[in-house]
Amino acid sequence: MTVTVSGPDFVALQVRDVEAAAVFYEKHLGLRRAPASPPGAVVFATEPVPFAVREPLPGVDLDTVERPGLGVALWFRTTDAQALHDRLHAAGTIIVKAPENGPFGRMFTFVGPEGYAITAHEG
């Protein structure tokens, strides 16, 4: 039997405050909660890959890391990167890379409520 892997099928960020993180992604990015989520998590109805915020796994102490997710590139597709940037900036969200035209369209990077760096790009 040959085993194959087709790629990422689910992405979840471990966070200290699941509800506060979920509200951020709903309010500022317009994500909608999926009809069902497992205990300790909020899953969003994103496509093609579901995205979630969840309680830390056993043995994970987010208070001991300088910046969660360091070394991982997490990108969200948007229809208008500049408008999203402007909305996040006006809400006081930290922008770590200003909007620019890149290989995947207009893009910028911001810091989510738990310190994860997230790049939004038009696609």
Image (cartoon, rainbow, N blue to C red):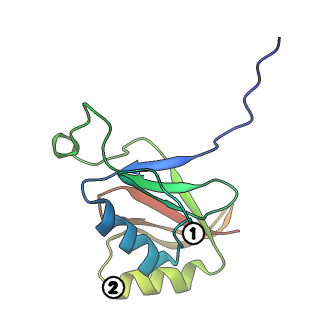
Q: Nearer the viewer, residue 44 or 122?
A: 44
Residue under numbered circle 1: 107
Q: Is residue 34 above or below residue 48?
A: below
Residue type at mark 2 is Ala
Mark number for residue 91? 2
**Element assignment for label 2:** loop
Relative to 39, residue 96 above or below: below
Above-or-below relation of 11 to 24: above
Reply above or below: 48 against 59.
Answer: below
Which image quadrant is residue 20 in?
Answer: bottom left
Q: Callout 1, which amino acid? A: Met
Q: Give the farthest residue toward the left.
A: 63
Which residue is farthest top? 1
Please state the total of marks drawn on the protein image: 2
Q: Residues within 10 Å of mark 2 (few under 14, many from 20)?
A: few
Residue 65: x %, y % from top left: 22, 42
Structural distance between the alpha carbons of marks 2 and 1:
18 Å
Residue at image position (31%, 53%) is 15
Residue at left 24%, top 30%? 59
> Which image quarter holds the N terminus?
top right
In the image, taking residue 116 as reference, residue 107 lies left or right, namely right
Answer few, some or many: residues within 10 Å of disc 1's Cα (few below 14, many 20 plus, some between 14 and 19): many
Q: Position of residue 5 (x, y in %)?
A: 72, 29
Q: Nearer the viewer, residue 35 or 10?
A: 35
Q: Looking at the image, is mark 2 or mark 1 earlier in the sequence? A: 2
Q: Position of residue 78 (x, y in %)?
A: 62, 73
Residue at left offset 50%, top offset 62%: 119
Residue 114 falls left or right of residue 1: left
Tell whether label 1 touches label 2 (CB within 8 Å): no
